[in-house]
Amino acid sequence: MFQQAKGYLLEYFRDKSALFFSLLFPALLCFILGSMLQSLDNPDEPLGEIRVAAAVETEDEAFGAGVAAFMDGLTDSADVVLVGGVGQGADAARGLVDAGDADAALVFSDGEIAVYEGADYLLSNAVRLIAQGFARQYDAIFVAVTENPESYPQIAAVQEQDAGGFTERQVSGVNRSMMDFYAVAMIVMIAFMGNGIGGASALYFGRQNGTLRRVCASPKSRAQVFFGYLLGGLVQSAVQAAVVMVCAYFLFGASYADRWQDNVLLFCFFLVLGAAISGVCNLVGLFVRFNPYTPLMAVFWAMLYMSGTFNKDIALGGVTLPPTAALEAAFDLTVFGRDGKVLFAMAICAVIILASGWIGSLMLRRKAVVL
Amino acid sequence: MEYVKVYRVTKRYGEFTAVDNLSFTVNKGEIFGFLGPNGAGKTTTLNVLSTLSDFDGGEVEIAGYALPKQEFSVKRILGLVPQEIALYMDLTAQENVTMFASLYGLSGAALRAAVDEALAFVGLADEAKKRVKKMSGGQQRRLNIACGIAHGPELIIMDEPTVGVDARSRELIMGSIRTLNERGATIIYTSHYMPEVQELADRIAIIDHGRLAGIGTEEELLEHVTDRKTLRIGVDDKNAVFLSKGVEGKSDVILREVAESSKNLLEQISRLPGVKHAAFSDGQLRVDVDLTLPSISPILGVLMERGVAVKSLAEEAPTLETTFLALTGNELTKEGA
């Protein structure tokens, strides 16, 4: 089985055209199209009203003036509502967040700005990003604290409980860029292109050129034969994900998840995702009577396009396409540090791998398939 | 000792019966030639023997193991050299042989030794690191054999292993088959190329329309032909050269006209009383006639009428080719090989 997988991998990685179209081309296209289209990027839905509680406790006049100007600018926005005025103390501001009357509290003290985030991570994030901008401008120390650390497991490792029930965390300094999104989208794309086309082609050409027949004439069970190809797909996705993650990190500064544990999980997710795609497409290769390369390419491009790989996803009447689900799960992990969707997707992938292995073995036992 | 026993085997694809009640045996240590025209059921039979295909009726036993029940026992002693070049084109010769040999449980030093020996055996030791797609057709054919024999099988099934190879590679392949046999392997061998089968096979089975038309040694098969003799007529006709090389399907207009003319000539001769078959072969006109044919004058008359000069005339003893024709009513190939 390992030799069979090795043969599959060598054949795949030595085929320059397969490498270009399934690995390099999607990567280039993802970055190029992503860069071209990012100006068209708009939020999917408006956040609505953001309630901000603020407390200013500073003796520094210059900083105080800056804070005043900042608050004026902030409240000029129709979407931001100041709750309780700026004259209240830090405890009062935090209390408003505690009570759910404010989405986040900003506490300005000498040279420091602290954001106390509420339970709604989207609204809290918005306030934090605004405050980060101010902190950069005034070179202020920036501290973010949250009362809902579970929504940010990626920063939970550096949390510290304070007396008020808030959890203080150091902002990791990760500045999200579009590259982070492209890098993840790119791996998902390559998983579909590389594993999909590679998996289908391996079985299809195996049938065409007689190598599958030869393998089936050996004393290996049909299940071993099929899982040999699947194992090849698994290793292929591992190589692809590792290469792209490392290259995107060093060459393009993609940061992925904040915690290394989450990055390991992300890698494992890409691995099983690729293997699941391989499994399904192995079945396609076992079934079709024509070269599956072109039709699969078209299907994958369409799915990836509609899934928002290049820009925004296209709603399909409530139908979630596989790449959309994969992207959502990956982004949930990398951006918000939540692993629920990824673990669920991995479980689904595992079921797909086993099911495709079982179906593939049955198909191979129908001996006419290989002749 | 009967090593392979095929008894009343039938294989159907829907309404089409590819193998019909076929029975034969292969003795241990012999080279068994399997002859038949395209679509005769040779490859289907080999697929059954190599466990790749189920069968609808009958019994198959190889080395005492019954198919399909003891399929895995059969697979372990089997080496398959398929008709197509069943190789990974982007892998090297060595990687290909290693991959296929490892499927039979070989590993480590034993695997490396088996791979090196198989490559040396087919004369590809120096090409071990060469990728298959960069090899010549003959080298690929030889590698195809190496992949089927590296694990040291007792029974080797070879489906037209010399198709499309040059004379040197053909000679190498023929030599390697003989050596494998001398080392104790039982070989079942199919070919369109009759001289090859005549040269190699200890016994020959002739199959047509899925049925066994004849089986035995070459001498035994020749005994089937008691009603005819073959005339070889050397003719001064360039058409003969074209036809004997095969012009079917050629697109060249002139060549097609020539072919048409020659075809008409053959048809005219075939219609003569006492003539069983006429064909061009190796630049000669070969005519199978009844032993009782009183005179060959009508044949010569047709040739003269068509302006074809007769250069030589010889009567030939029955050959495997005439036997094949007598048993199946067809030539083995259109080319008359």
Image (cartoon, helix red, strand yellow):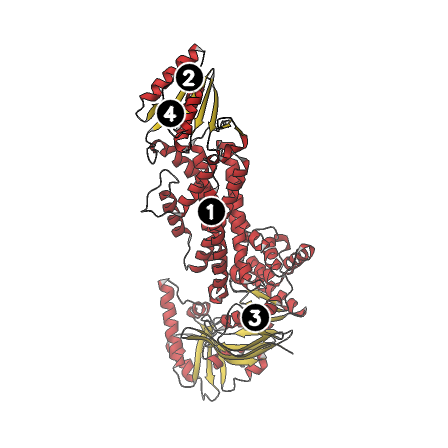
Query: Which of label 3 and label 4 is nearer to you?
Result: 4
Q: Which residue is mark 1?
A: A344
Q: Which residue is mark 3?
A: B189
Q: Nearer the viewer, residue B34 or B228?
A: B34
Cα distance between the residues tagged 3 and 4: 86 Å
Label 4 SS: strand
Q: Give the image location of residue B32, x and y in percent.
A: 59, 74
Chain letter belonging to callout 2 = A
Q: Sequence order check: which comes first, mark 1 or mark 2? A: 2
Quarter the N terminus of chain A occupies: bottom right
Q: Which residue is mark 4?
A: A52
Chain letter belonging to callout 1 = A
Residues at discs 1 and 2 both on one chain: yes
Cα distance between the residues tagged 4 and 1: 35 Å
Decide: is A343 above or below B315. Answer: above
Chain letter belonging to callout 4 = A
Q: Are marks 3 and 2 in contact (CB under 8 Å)?
A: no
Q: Amino acid at mark 2?
A: Val
Query: Which of label 1 and label 2 is nearer to you?
Result: 2
Q: Nearer the viewer, residue A335 or A31?
A: A335
Q: Amino acid at mark 3?
A: Tyr
Q: Is residue A302 left or right of residue B172?
A: left
The 10 Å Cα crowd at callout 1, few under 14, some 14 to 19, many 20 or more, is few
Q: Sequence order check: which comes first, mark 4 or mark 1? A: 4
Q: Which residue is mark 2?
A: A56
